[in-house]
Amino acid sequence: MTDQLNEDPTTWETGELVAFLEKAALAYRQGTPLIEDDLYDHVYLAELCKRDPEHPFLHQVEAEPDYGAGRLKHPEPMLSTEKSYSIEETRKWVKRIQSEAKKQGIDVAELRVMVTAKLDGLAAMLREDGRLVTRGDGAYGNDISSAFDKGVVDVGNGAPGVGELVMVESYFEQHLKAAGYAHPRNVCVGIVNSDEINADFKQALAAGMVRFVPYAALEKWQGSLEELLNDHDAIQQQVRESCDYPIDGVVAEITDEKLKTLLGSTSHHNRWQIAIKQRAVAKQTTVKSISWQTGRTGRVTPVLGVEPIELSGAIVSRITAHHAGNVRALGLGEGAVITAERSGEVIPKIVAVVESAKKTTLPKKCPSCEHELVWEGDFLTCVNHLACPAQIKNTLEHFFRTHGQVDGFGPRSIDKLVEAGIDTLQKIYASTEEDFIKAGFGEGQSKNLRRELNRSLSVQIEDWRLLAAFGIARLGKGDSRRLLQGMRLEHLASVTEEEIIRIDGFAGLSAGIIVAELKEMWPKIEQMLELGFKLEETPLLSEADSIESPIAGMKIVFTGKMLQASRDEMKKQAMQLGAKVQSAVSSTTDLLVCGENVGAAKTGKAEKLGVRVVTEAEYVALLK
Ligand SMILES: [Zn+2]
């Protein structure tokens, strides 16, 4: 928890960020969250949205953990639903439907739309063969047919179709909420997940309160697209009130079968359907405590411990206040009353301070090393960079995480090593199995640690990645890569500010900081390099221009899902062939390479800018 809070995902590679998101999402669904929900959404997911709004991770159907009697393939993929959080977003969807209808010669005024509740349970499908299968990853789900034997009621009486396993909401409110159950969905998961059913759940099952509800069995509102927009909120209200199951919005879909077929689907959702959700209401809570945590760079971050509140089905008890400047400006502290919100994919945050704390206390000393803190902008910072245990630990963790190919050096191991005095990379790499055993590790683990260190020296690693792993200020992965496109790693030993400023993307201030940091850290970095990492040199841009290849010197953007190799690999290959890879299309772009599922908006924009748009296959042909 501590290290995640202090970690800055803006410095991570996208691949690394996605791997972490996947891990965290899985842990969450298995009921053992790695990080708090608000951090997941607010910091990590938000970073991916910002960086790559079209990343497949954001658009795939969420996977779920295995339960039930094994996995089954769905006859047709069970997709997720596109979401709208405002009438503007619904209007866009309506416009898309209307323009497609016009193209097909269908009278727009005749189009009907159907609205049902969007149940907040466990999505599943009752198949023709009578098996009940969860949505799973959309392609495969888990066989949970035994739910019916346990007493789950099939509201559709055996009719096949898509629906949700839910618990009657009024029953939950009356009987289970007071007993400490957080959400009716968790009860459903508990029932399908386990053969041992507790007394509370047995009672609910016996009362017929846990049900499989096919969407076809729900009450519907029907009207025209125009009415849907005119009565946008009233319709939601009406549907909500007609339903005694937990819901998290409504689903609108057009009824014209021909148009539905024409509209089809993306890999994520059906185009003829949209889920309309309301932004969560902000909830009030009281601050119980503030804890302060020192990160790798010495910044000390305030985390509010609050009276637990349920926000969109998740219990939140810690909310980050970002920096000390906020705490001071907003009067945060024990007893402060704040409102916080979290809705769907929208980031959770402090909305307002209802009542400031009587007393706001800012720490004077670092919580880790007790060194005096100093203000740097809005941040309180511990400048005891070389001796502060929190900074030492976080720096070591940062190295191994950024290296990315060494296992076993997570927060717990690092704690143990630092406590045993093995507190620098040099000392870690110089340690033998016996040293690790002396530090308190078991024999097997000690052997693994040593083997992993050796392996880290024998696998290929990009020189910019290793540079970024040292955690030099202003040299995250992106900047390390840019820097090494302008000069060789060895040259950093004597680099000047002027040389750095000459490279695209570096300004005077960062150049000054980088030079100062390198001067201090280079002797240690050099020692590390002498260990013999197998470095893969970043091609210099000046050399890239002289590479002979059909794409040398071209500025290229890759978008969408690639079939040949991962997008990251394709980027790397393009760079080796002398192309410059850009992250977004601009007027300087020469080529936009589109993988699968690239929206017309993106290609349209590129075409308008005069950028050549090619498919992945055309690009591959071009290389030959
Ligand atoms: Zn400190």
Image: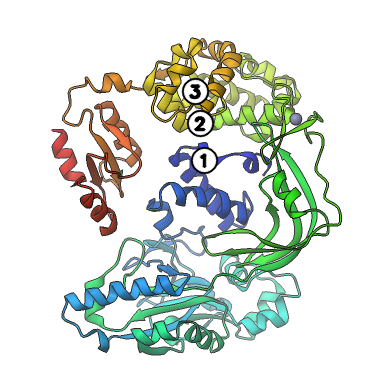
335 displayed left or right of 469: right
Identify the residue shown where x is 46% and y is 49%: 50
Which amino acid type corresponds to the residue marked 2 in the rendered image? Gly
Q: Nearer the viewer, residue 533 or 386?
A: 386
Q: Which mark sits nearer the N-terminus, 1 or 3?
A: 1
Q: Position of residue 608 (x, y in %)?
A: 22, 52
Which quarter holds ligand 1?
top right
From what the image shows, is residue 16 above or below residue 37? above
Identify the residue shown where x is 24% and y is 74%: 99
Tell me the SS state at disc 3. helix
Q: Position of residue 604 (x, y in %)?
A: 24, 55
Dividing the image into 4 quarters, which one contains the C terminus? top left
Report whether the residue tagged 1 is closer than 8 Å to ligand 1. Answer: no
Q: Position of residue 623 (x, y in %)?
A: 16, 34
Disc 1 from disc 2: Cα separation? 8 Å
Looking at the rendered image, the disc whose residue lies closer to the viewer, 3 or 2, is 2
Mark 1, residue position: 10
Q: Residue 113, located in which quarter of the rendered image?
A: bottom left
From what the image shows, is residue 16 above or below residue 527? below
Mark 2, residue position: 476
Disc 3 from disc 2: Cα separation? 9 Å
Q: Position of residue 581 (x, y in %)?
A: 31, 35
